[in-house]
Image: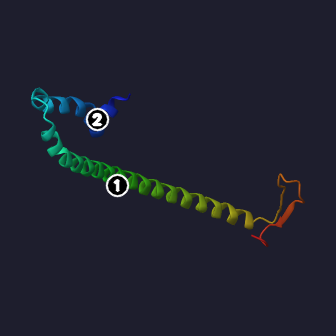
Amino acid sequence: MQPAGFRKLTGFLALSAASTALIAASPALAAPLLTTTIAGFAPYAVTVGAAGFGLVATLLALKWRREADAANVQASEKLASLRAALDEVETLVAGMPEVSILWKDSGLEPVVRPGHHHL
């Protein structure tokens, strides 16, 4: 585990949630178990659990969306730089009077391109 990984909020919450739940629930655990009390709180527990799940899922979706947008921006910048490099090479090759012969791995006839006529 990396040292910085422990200091993240999600890592801290994941490690401290179980102990915090036990400390907060200790008076309830010491009280006698009544079925009517538990049955009365069940709808609230389900509601709070569903709301918590929805909140966590929404936050994770937003985080993943932000990361995907950043990756898209980075990929677009890389693609633009590669296109610029390709344009530069094509311009350089188009200005040369030599003939370019391209062989493909498929064993077909070679492609012959005169300098500036077919680019």
Left or right: 26 in relation to 63: left
Few, some or many C-alpha atoms within 10 Å of disc 2 (few <14, some 14-19, many ≥20)?
few
Along the line of sight, the residue nearer the viewer: 72 or 18: 18
Above-or-below relation of 74 to 10: below
Residue pictured at 25% horizontal, 51% vertical? 51
Above-or-below relation of 107 to 7: below
Looking at the picture, the colour scheme in use is rainbow
Tell me the CA gap for discs 1 and 2. Answer: 19 Å
Along the line of sight, the residue nearer the viewer: 102 or 74: 74
The tag on residue 14 is: 2
Q: Earlier in the sequence, mark 1 or mark 2?
A: 2
Q: The residue under label 2 is which amino acid type?
A: Ala
Above-or-below relation of 111 to 26: below
- Mark 1 or 2, which is nearer the eye? 2
The tag on residue 62 is: 1
- Element class at badge 2: helix
